[in-house]
Amino acid sequence: MISNPNNLVMYQDEPLFVMPVTIDVGEFSVRGYAYYDQKREQSERHSFYKRLYEIAERIRDVRLRSWMSPVNVIKEVAKKDARYITWKVNGDRFEVELKKNSVSQRVNRMGRFILLYQGDFGGEECLSLYRSKDVVEKEFDSIKNDLEVMPANVRKDTTMKGYLFICFLSLILRMRLMKMMRDAELSKRYSVEALIIEIEKNKVMILPDGTQIVTEQTKRQREILEALCA
């Protein structure tokens, strides 16, 4: 069982349950890790229940007209969540209830996911690599979105190329830092953002005569720098 206390690890200062699994796909067996993240489960539950409540209220607020198809109304309002709702028409209104079993089955899967892999990876390393890939994809999506909203008629080609070059460099630096963090086993305790926030607290003061004074490093900062420079 994934929630067995013996499957508990600490990943980036958060408790996480990790268990190796083997999945048979036809004639092949694929190795992977099953994960259970209680923090993620809580967040998913909150979003799910909030969404269901809002959908049910919107359906109840609908006043049906003679030309309206109740089935189409439900599909339009509930979309993919229609399978969690049972309804009937009473006059020109909907009476709506949530399907207890369907909702329970969905909630019981929250916070749980499986990553399949090839090679030799530990559970934490596998998750770190997956999240690194996810971060890079989000960065590219962000760049794409930025480009789509840029008014092409006021942007010079040189400015656009410079912007793309800086974005590309930032991705290279981020991936390099991620690798250094994995090698130093810092990715178990910090995300990239958390590590940068911790390091940027270290300040350098420049006096009028040009003398530079570095503020005293915290214990965490020393541990991070020593691990990265080892």
Image (spheres, rainbow, N blue to C red):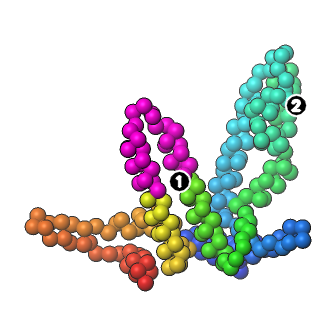
Q: Dot 2: few (<14), some (14–19), or many (≥20) neighbours within 10 Å?
A: few
Residue nearest the viewer, comparing 158 with 56: 158
Residue 112 position in % (x across, y down): 73, 63
Residue at coordinates 67% horizontally, 54% vertically from top-left? 44
Is 17 rendered above or below residue 45? below
* N-terminal label among 1 and 2: 2
**Magenta-colored span:** 140-168
Q: Quadrant of residue 17?
A: bottom right
Left or right: where does residue 103 sit relative to residue 153? right
Left or right: where does residue 97 sit relative to residue 160? right
**112 inside magenta stretch:** no
Left or right: where does residue 219 sit relative to residue 124? left
| Secondary structure mostly seen in the magenta stretch | helix
Q: Work out how far the residue at label 1 is from the one at label 2, CA to CA, in angstroms.
A: 45 Å
Q: So how many labels did they put on this image?
A: 2
Residue at coordinates 72% horizontally, 67% vertically from top-left? 115
Residue at the farthest top position: 66
Residue that carries the numbered disc 1 in the rendered image: 139
Is 53 rendered above or below residue 114? above
**SS of the residue under disc 2:** strand
Q: Dot 1: few (<14), some (14–19), or many (≥20) neighbours within 10 Å?
A: some
The C terminus lies in quadrant: bottom left
Residue that carries the numbered disc 2 in the rendered image: 88
Residue at coordinates 82% horizontally, 20% vertically from top-left? 68
